[in-house]
Amino acid sequence: MALNAVYLASLKRPEIIQKWTAKDAALYALGLGYGDDPTDSEQLRFLDRTKGMDVMPAMANVLCYDGSWLRDPEAGIDYSRVVHGEQEMVLHAPLPLESSATGKTVIEELIDKGEGRGALIVTARELKDARTGQMLATIRHTIFCRGAGGFGGSAGRERSVQVIPDGDPDGSVEIKTQNQLALIYRLSGDFNPLHSDPEVARKVGYDRPILHGLSTFGIACRALMRELAGNDPLRVRLIRARFSAPVYPGEAIVFDYWRLEPGSAAFSARVPARDASVLANGRFEYIPGE
């Protein structure tokens, strides 16, 4: 079934207003594995309001998101064959601990990979403070729709891809995920049963429920922010990566990074136990420390 480009190009998504509290921010952080060491003050700063709490910046990825249009039969998309391709988060201002934001998803590009090869949908979402109008973040999300190619669209414009440097990384960070992590992360808004129902996971070829891609992406931000930006959310500027394989809850993820020019690094992520690359072509930008 080919993607219905005419329908999608004319699709107008409504603006979404989402409110969050310190409790929501803490729940999001728990979905990235924060609190696995409840004595670590660097983790508690994103969990405990009594200690002077900050918002984990990657929470911007889950705000004001509505993916219901992907299930619209007129779109020509088989939702069971949709895969998260890439994600980019650009931060313009820190997320307040308690506030509300507005955001509207727009389709920036439809890319035809050819009949039998699928299609890519590139979306963008600008998050603004609902009270002041200040820009908070820009989120780009690339969706790979298997089997939806051949609709007569373009092959897409040339995109810059972060090349991972040759040679050993400048550093590596390992984070062990908890067995129940997907069940926690889904409480931030993604209730796809692929991440909670063993039967659904088996039907699409997985041994068991997989971790949300955006949880893996957020964990990457967690690891790199601590390693390169002093664990300071005010210093995070951008993170993007391509999803190359899923993570199973309970697995350990190793994030390798290579320092580039001041304030930027390339990174990738892998699960050593399966020799699997799970994030590729990663880039992290931050304000360098003194």
Image (tube, helix red, strand yellow):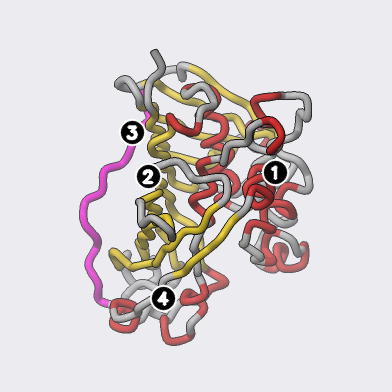
Most distant residue in the bottom direction: 74
x then y, percent, for residue 110 = 30, 68
Q: Quadrant of residue 123?
A: bottom left
How packed mark 2 is, by other alpha carbons closer than 10 Å (few <14, some 14-19, many 20 or more), is many
Mark 4 or mark 2: which comes first in sequence? 4
Mark 3 or mark 4: which comes first in sequence? 4
**Residue beneath the point at 70% across and 43% down:** 30
Dots 2 and 3: beta carbons under 8 Å? no
Position of 66 relative to 38 (above/below): below
Q: Which residues are magenta?
A: 152-165
Q: Is residue 157 magenta?
A: yes
x then y, percent, for residue 281 = 40, 38
Circle 1 sits on which residue?
A: 30
The secondary element bearing badge 2 is classed as: strand
**Residue beneath the point at 51% across and 18% down:** 171
**Residue type pointed to by label 1:** Leu
